[in-house]
Image: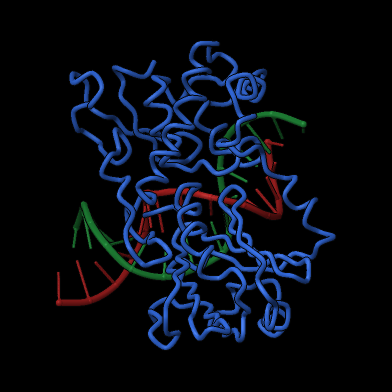
Chain colours: A blue, B green, C red
Amino acid sequence: MLMPELPEVETVKRQLEPLVTGRTIASVRVLDSLAVAPASPAAFRKAVRDKPILGITRRGKYLRVQMTSGETLVLHLRMTGRLTHIDDPRSAEKRHLRILFTLDDGSGLAFNDLRRFGRAFVLSAADSEKYWERLGPEPLERSFNSKALKGILDSRKRPIKSLLLDQSLIAGIGNIYADETLFRAGIHPLRPAAEVTGPEVSRLAQAIKETLRAAIALEGSSVDTYRTARGLRGRFQETFRVHRRLGELCPGCGAATVEKIKVGGRGTYFCPGCQT
DNA sequence: CAAAGAACCTGGCGGC
DNA sequence: TGCCGCCAGGTTCTTT
């Protein structure tokens, strides 16, 4: 499958920014009411129509479209969502099309989603602060250093991989980047978080930043359904070290082969030789 | 409060 | 060839 995680959402955000900033959402078609639930399609259309767009930002795996009314149009792609900008809304991919926005310059924004887990909703200015408080720190912020990461891991007994996936502790890491960062740091995914040593925490903090930055540079990972805002595939999957490489020779030690286990219900790939 | 598990969805794939 | 059941995973909700 695919999973839009921080690098994928960041890629979409960067590509959309110059295309939608300053534009106004002229019309909205909701083709699948589940995509805007629990709001009604009528309420959703009313909340976003004719609202000028100030800018677009990302928080964790969420995309936020700031509107001049002080409200925010929030989109979460979950597992199979795609958000693509098209010159002509009539040329939008019809398969799994959930919402189609038309902007005042005649271009369009299409939200497609095979699995129907993705959501779009509008947050009022009053509700915003509280909503985003639920998320942990942004791993690419300067303040997210080894000391901050140590504070997150300390006194927690869960497997380190489960902590990396917990959005209330760190925002934006999903299954792909959890596997890839743990491999780069040489840490076994089942290690109890509190038992990860100081030097390992430093390596992990660095691996998180380096891996996410490298993935953004390659416009994310297209394992299956993810596409950039221009409808193209990302290329970071070509550089995966262990994720989805079951049985392959480890690129680190060249001796062991990649294994797959379940951690917190998630498929987890690692090298038993390099990750201890 | 922490942690684990189920539920939500659809399409692809293995097995028979 | 066709059908059944399982698997994938981000987040929320429920249970322990």
Please tell me which residue lies in front, A37 or A73.
Answer: A73
Q: Quadrant of residue A43?
A: bottom right
Q: Residue furthest top?
A: A198
* Residue that appears at 59% across and 66% down: A119
Where is residue A162? Give x, y as percent. Answer: 54, 33
Q: Quadrant of residue A144?
A: top right
Please tell me which residue lies in front, A201 or A39.
Answer: A201
* Residue that appears at 57% across and 31% down: A163
Left or right of A181, for residue A120: right
- The quadrant of the image that shows the C terminus of chain A is top left
As drawn, A206 above or below A220: above
Where is residue A216? Give x, y as percent. Answer: 42, 46
* Residue that appears at 52% across and 61% down: A77
* Residue that appears at 36% across and 67% down: A231
Left or right of A181, for residue A253: left
Please tell me which residue lies in front, A262 or A80.
Answer: A80
